[in-house]
Amino acid sequence: MLKLFGFFLIGLFLNSAAGQSVLPKREMRAVWIATISNIDWPSSKYLSTAEKINELTDLFDKLKEIGINAVFFQVRPESDALYDSPYEPWSGWLTGKQGRAPEPYFDPLKLAVEEAHKRGMELHAWINPLRVSNGSYHDCSDGHICNVHPDWIMKFSNYKMLDPGIPEVREYVAQIVSDIVRRYDVDGVNFDDYFYPYKPAITKEDYGSYKNFKGNYKRISDWRRDNINKLIKVVHDSLIASNKKVKFGISPFGIVKNSYAGTAGLNSYSRVYSDPLRWLKDKTIDYIVPQVYWTIGNKSADYKSLISWWASVVDEQHLYIGQTLTFAGSKIKRNIDDEIFAQIELNRNYENIYGSVFFSASTLLKNIYSKTAKPIFKYHALVPSLSYRDSIPPMPPKNLRAYNNGNGFILEWDKEERASDGDTAKFYVVYKFDNPD
């Protein structure tokens, strides 16, 4: 028997919120929590364990309050770990020294999963697949991949990356992902867009692996894109084999080619050798989150033109738009809150745009309210259902009862039976309406 004391208010969709003419029942309203450089959490690597735990739970409370229903939590910023990994050292951004475990011990990913699920939120493990170091303060620890496999590393002036042209590197990244989805109750895995470096751009750092593994490729640019496609496929396949219920998504740079959406900016196809159309065609990802970090009407990269193009190329997979409050390009012409509201409204004009992912948590919480602004989301929403991966819904609860104990209503029900695919419900949603009609 299950009991619910009071109501978990997931949605009231009968009224309209300021600036929001459509209030969907399901909409991705996610946020990235960046741990590198202590951008979002922890605020300092030198906090005590208790302070870090309190800070994270407080962050989740605030995100829930403004209507966020999913968190993309960065757990592998520099081939290190903000979880208890058997393969990679603890992150220095967590403890102050790479390889040093938290003391007293706690596991941030385990805590984040628990805190997210308590609040009815999804938790996606955000992974930087190839970054080794971004020129940060710390040296690599003895157990770090740059010391264990220096032959796998590409070195730049202020950057180190794993070389995806080496087959063992791709298998290693897949092993990391498989380990996470086997041991942690994550809802998804999210890769960011650092496949090859933006700046400085790669030149001859991977010529050795190109010579060894180029196969029939005559152009190194095509070979590099194929390396990333192979990486995505091996990660997808190993993830499905390890835990078929976990979603896999990537957040590429918002501009793939300038010719696609009439833009005039850096493009990911030739700079970081990213080919999102191939991932979509091959169905090696479940969702895509292009980082469209420009304003509506931007002359070089118009937000409206970009999301319209992305909506035209995504079919079965889910399309969420990566948004920010620190806009690129020309100076924002209106209030930040107004711009975000306008972008959300624009997203809702497209049937296959399923919501937003905001960068990043601290920026969102700091800037989304001005003295006169209203909440970004007035009512809560459920995360979208990824029906092409799982079309069988859970069975409904049995024997629902409700009674008033004088202080409020108590709901009771019996747990549902397993659906035909063996699943049971992960969350229960209770709606409360002020108007019984």
Image (tube, helix red, strand yellow):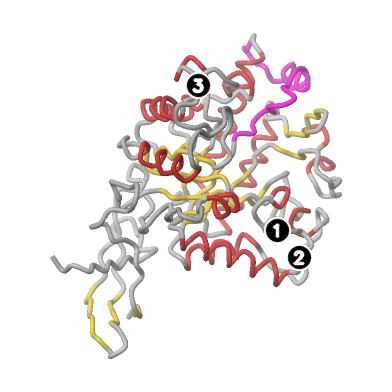
Q: Residue furthest top?
A: 218
Report the predominant secondary structure element of the magenta stretch. Answer: loop
In the displayed structure image, the side of residue 160 where residue 316 appears, left or right? left
Residues at marks 2 and 1, CA–CA distance in whole angstroms: 8 Å
Amino acid of disc 2: Leu
What crowding class fits label 1: few (fewer than 14 Cα within 10 Å), some (14-19), or many (20 or more)?
some
Mark 1 / mark 3, whichever is N-terminal: 1
Where is mark 2, residue-wise? Answer: 47
| Residue 206 counted in the magenta span | yes
From the viewer's perspective, is residue 166 above or below residue 61? above
Secondary structure type for disc 2: loop
Amino acid of disc 3: Lys
Residue that appears at 32% across and 65% down: 429
Q: Are marks 1 and 3 in contact (CB under 8 Å)?
A: no
| Residue 393 counted in the magenta span | no
Q: Give the magenta range.
A: 193-217
Q: Position of residue 121 (x, y in %)?
A: 46, 59
Foreground: disc 2 or disc 3: 3
Name the one closer to the observer, 20 or 67.
Answer: 20
Where is mark 1, residue-wise? Answer: 43
Q: Are marks 2 and 1 in contact (CB under 8 Å)?
A: yes
Secondary structure type for disc 1: loop
Residue 413's image quarter? bottom left
Amino acid of disc 1: Ser
In the displayed structure image, the side of residue 213 where residue 391 appears, left or right? left
Residues at marks 1 and 3, CA–CA distance in whole angstroms: 36 Å
Question: What label does residue 299 carry, if any?
Answer: 3
Q: Position of residue 311 (x, y in %)?
A: 37, 30
Q: Residue furthest bottom?
A: 406
